[in-house]
Amino acid sequence: MNYKFGAVASALAVAATMYANPALAEVCDTPTALGDLGKFDGETITIMGSMEGNDEEMLTNAVSCFEKATGAVVKYSGSRDFAALIVADLRSNNAPNIAIFPQPGLAADMAKEGHLTPLGQASADWMTENYGAGSSWAALGTYANADGKEDFYGFAYKMDLKSLVWYSPEQFEDNGYEIPDTMEGLLALSDQMVEDGNTPWCIGVESGNATGWTATDWMEDLMLRTTTPENYDRWVSNDLPFNSPEVVNAMEVYGQFSRNDDYVAGGASSVATTFFGDAPKGLFSSPASCMMHRQASFIPSFFPKKGEEVANGEADFFYFPPYESADLGNPVLGAGTLWTMTKDSPATRAFFEYLKEASAHEVWMGQGSFLTAHKGANLDAYATPALRKQGEILSNATTFRFDASDLMPGAIGAGAFWSEMTAFANGQDTKKTADNIQSAWDAIK
Amino acid sequence: MTRTLKHVVLLLIVFIWVLPFVALVTTSLRSETASKTSGFWTAFTPTELGHRFGTHDKGETQPFVTMSGNIFERLNKDRDSFIIEGDVESILFKGRLPDPDNPGKTKLLRQLIYAGETMDVRDGKFVFQTNGDFTWTFPEASAPKPKNLVTFINQDPVFGTDAYVEVLFENKNVTNALISSFIVTIPATIIPITIAAFAAYAFAWMRFPGRDWLFVLVVSLMVVPTQLAFLPVLQGFSGIASWATSLNAWMTDCEATKTCQVASKSFASLWVTHTAFGLPLAIYLLRNYIVGLPKELLESARIDGASHLQIFTKLIIPLSVPALASFGIFQFLWVWNDLIVALYIGSADSADLVFPIRLQKQLGTFKDQLHLLNASAVISIIVPVIVFLAMQRYFIRGLLAGSVKGG
């Protein structure tokens, strides 16, 4: 019975591919040619991840070039419940070939349980060699297995830049605002906006069972701007406790933005209940409900016209500036999705070889909402000047740090940190928030 | 008096229950902007809505002294449906002027400009009328940059089926998911009813040792939550699948085409899971009904020499139609609306996804596009409503019959 339905399904899939074909030919036509990956006719690779919608479409396009080159069949299934589903699948022996972890914390947990297959030291060395800030990326994908032995598991592909402030140039022009290049200037501009009767910020941290992550991004960006990168690293490893003065200070600065009724569209109480993807829409509503939105490079997919605004000049971004007085250089916060091998097969290994190809990066660069640290990738492949500009922010950074919540253990970085920051948005005291996160961390030590 | 009161209360209850559905249907028929910026109850009367209208396109650089046009024409330029009609109320004007109170500083002026009033746009004089006609006059021929103005329009009600067209025809996934849902739901309803009918007969009319204890065991299984069993059930399926894969490799020449792999998550695994978790309630419901059938009827059948199978097929089944139908509705609705079992146990192939998963995916993709989500939700409601209406007379009878002993 099952076979019959399988046949119907694959017939549908074939039909779908045929529809998409003309566009695909162009997508795979990258500036750098694809190397030889071998032939794997009919072999199936299954991938599980959390990307849905636009991202899923672009991912499907990117892997289709691998399918075309090798004859293998790649099946991707994305779900917003990835974090829960992948754990059930790995523990019940139903592993896909590849799992794409949005957070290294969970990947490290799975490596510890012995569900991930190492990609080998050669891949780690390749990454150190060929990625900008390569050793940090290699370290991001290195975890301990059940025996405590460290190995390279997570291949970073598709990166996000977080330290961006989005705005509508038209609104800035109408209101006569200038783009600030210091944090002092940004705060002065925000006050100016309030004085003019505008609302400076749109902030939303609601995100289903990941509610709170937007707030942790704010915190991390502000940590990098209020204290040294060394302290940031100590914070990530909890050598610097959550309730230490440095961290509490950063949280208070975040509170200056998010808990100020004059600063936030809809008032401070709306922060916890506003879907993070709806928050930027305030920039484009008529009349605009806010002037600025701090969010990572992926956010244009959530704009009303799905990011077309960036191309036609209705939206732009500037670098979330550092304090002039603090003298900490130009820190930049970023993140990346980690592709791990959860079930070994020759075709899967070839797929990881494919991810090393510059062409595999260029395919997605050309579609948008994709940044890469691959030094071999041709920058001309970026779909828009905006993406290129983000690439430049990445390279002008004097300090580059990964998303701290992604590096912390799952119970903190995808747990207490999120939920306590949501409680903070709901009015919980700064000190209590910091203490709660620290005691959650103490509990898992 | 009491009768009127009863009717009022009934009407109120019906109103409360129907209201969300009316809201859903109304919103699904409205335009994206309208559904996002105002409540569904405003859909039936003219409503003031903000629109952003651009004076001209970027490419038009021909110098002019006076530009005249129509706001509605500009707004409707790229629209095939949800045509904006009504009266232009006002335009929001923003600009910086020297602040009289703080010398050297400027002050943001924001003001609503009404029809017939003159406003200064890029140093030209901009005047509009209620019907949307506008003129933009400059002292001398010039080619200003286009200007987008926030325009408040008292808009006539407008409805369209665009969302349904997009969901059903442009986005093929939804029709595909409907088919998958039927493939899952129909066997997952029929299989447990069939098994349960046999079991219920045995529990009600056949004598065998430990019958009552076994029945208590079956009933107590009703309290086991599905979620608790996911991991062991998945492990079981993966064991069966790997066994089936090796059997497949041994019996067929699948190795040549690399099709040996039998999926552990499939429609079949969903049928088995839904059957297993639906059985306790089904057996309980049917047994209570069947035990209440007149004893004399069965005894006379047995005296006439009918076997158990004959009694079951010729007597029990025709007499139990109400109970069978009522459980059928239960099981159908439960499986049709199920998300979590399908998510964990069902195939993750995008071609095999059932409707609730598709809906959830749209939440991820279109959380901003309420009207699309609403359209899909309305479609997902239609099927259970049809099933319910078709079988409701059995449903009520069956519920009563199952609970009250005696015929």
Image: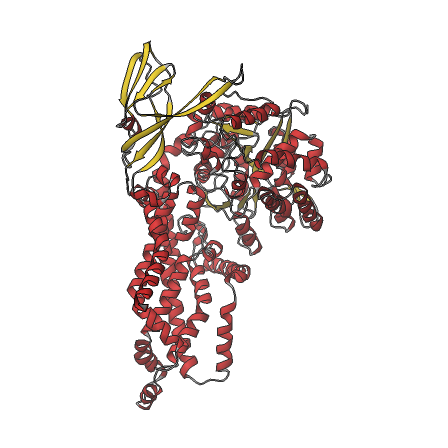
Quick check: B43 above or below B181? above
- Frontmost residue, B155 versus A361: B155
Q: Residue at x 38, y 61 (%)?
A: B333
- Frontmost residue, A417 versus B46: B46
- Frontmost residue, A417 versus A287: A287
Name, please, the residue furthest toward the top.
B140
For the N terminus of chain A, which image quadrant? bottom left
Question: Which quadrant of the structure image shows residue B269?
Answer: bottom left
Q: Is residue A222 shown to the viewer in this render?
A: yes
Name, please, the residue furthest toward the right.
A239
The image shows residue A185 at horizontal and vertical percentages of 59, 23
- On the rendered structure, is A444 left or right of B274? right
Colour scheme shown: secondary structure
The image shows residue A126 at horizontal and vertical percentages of 61, 33
The image shows residue B164 at horizontal and vertical percentages of 31, 45
Q: Residue at x 37, y 40 (%)?
A: B38
- On the rendered structure, is A81 left or right of B33? right
Q: Residue at x 29, y 30 (%)?
A: B76
Quick check: A111 above or below A157? below
- On the rendered structure, is A123 left or right of B125? right
The image shows residue B361 at horizontal and vertical percentages of 43, 46
- Count of numbered labels shown in the rendering: 0
Q: Residue at x 56, y 22 (%)?
A: A180
- On the rendered structure, is B62 left or right of A135? left
- Frontmost residue, A273 versus A153: A273
Q: Is residue A128 shown to the viewer in this render?
A: no
